[in-house]
Amino acid sequence: MNRNSPIKGRINMSNLCSEILQVNTPTSYHEDLSYDEIGKDISCNLGSLNIALAMDSPDLAKTVETAVRALTSVSDQSHTPSVRSVDSGNARCHAIGLGQMNLHGYLAREHIHYGSDIALDFTNIYFYTVLFHALRTSNELAMERGVAFDGFAESRYASGEFFDKYVNQEWVPATARVRELFAHQHIPNRADWQALRASVMEHGIYNQNLQAVPPTGSISYINNSTSSIHPIVSKVEIRKEGTVGRVYYPAPFMTNDNLEYYEDAYEIGYEKIIDTYAVATQHVDQGLSLTLFFKDTATTRDVNRAQIYAWRKGIKTLYYIRLRQRALEGTEVEHCVSCML
């Protein structure tokens, strides 16, 4: 993750959900515990797009721009004087994390199997397009406010190096189905990237970090979405919600006619999940919260194979490893310790 980061400095850690990957620096103290030098720590300013609604939008570019501006407003209005290193980091870096959810729901609605060639093609082009418009918006913010994030001059954005892979080749859908899905959206071309690179090198970008894909384990339910960009864990999920008791959540857009597109994560297997995250990762400056799912017959060797496969695919971080235990089916609760390693 440090090798691929466009920001100068070392990423030392992530948050618990493993999607926030930002450079931080330590705070030093005098012997009386007063501040010697205030370091730079991280404020999580996060929000996620519903992929199905974003794709239904007549203007995906405007949708992404609105989201980036909204999250930037959260950062600008955040003030944590009780934790001065976080306050300093937020004020200097304006870092945000635009995430995504409902990938599986959208694919199933469009009669596309999760992890298929078409699904990977869509994921690639979608995240590619979101990246462009997130950077474009941050560049506009820098021009409007007359300032870039602290450390921009030493970043791979300032040198233009970050943009090499986008200006040196054309990124286009590889399948007719994905071309059809993006028919009413503009997919950025090399000329767009060349113009953006020139503007960024001249004016900078306002946000040190722009994207991070969280697990969206709770907000996806109230959005009628599948969580994050991983597959469903069940066609109908059962959760224990406080004093309410069991609540049943059927997968979004599911009907009797499209059930075949709702394979769950345990049936799909780790390779297709990792493949999906890998094509998205290349367009995300931070991390993606990636959970691996195994049947209860899995061994530690199976888990190790999956971890090695993820590393070879360029995955930056891994989150939970969940086991399906038949004896516990129908008793699911949020963050059940028995279901995780």
Image (spheres, grey):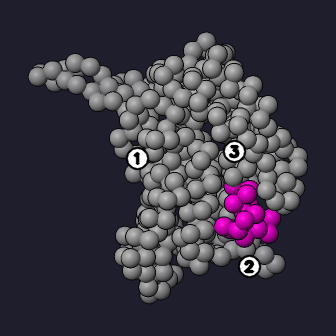
Is residue 225 or residue 196 the one in the foreground? 196
- Outermost residue, left side: 31
Local secondary structure at mark 2: helix
Please report the bounds of the magenta region as a residue range. Answer: 106-123
| Residue occupying image coordinates x 44% and y 71% | 305
Residue of label 2? 260
Question: How crowded is the residue under tag 2: few (<14 C-alpha within 10 Å), some, or many (20+)?
Answer: few
Q: Earlier in the sequence, mark 2 or mark 1?
A: 1
The one nearer the camera, 2 or 114, is 2
Assess whether mark 1 and mark 3 are in contact (beta carbons under 8 angstroms). Answer: no
Q: CA distance from mark 2 to mark 1?
A: 35 Å
Query: Is residue 202 placed above or below 285 in the rendered structure?
Result: above
**Position in image of residue 287 (x %, y %):** 51, 47
* Residue drawn at (29%, 30%) of the image: 26
Please provide percent x and percent y for residue 145: 62, 14
Q: Which residue is mark 3?
A: 128
Residue occupied by mark 1 = 15
Question: Toward the viewer: 267 or 84?
Answer: 267
Query: Circle 3 sits in a helix, a strand or a loop, which is it?
Result: helix
Mark 2: amino acid: Glu
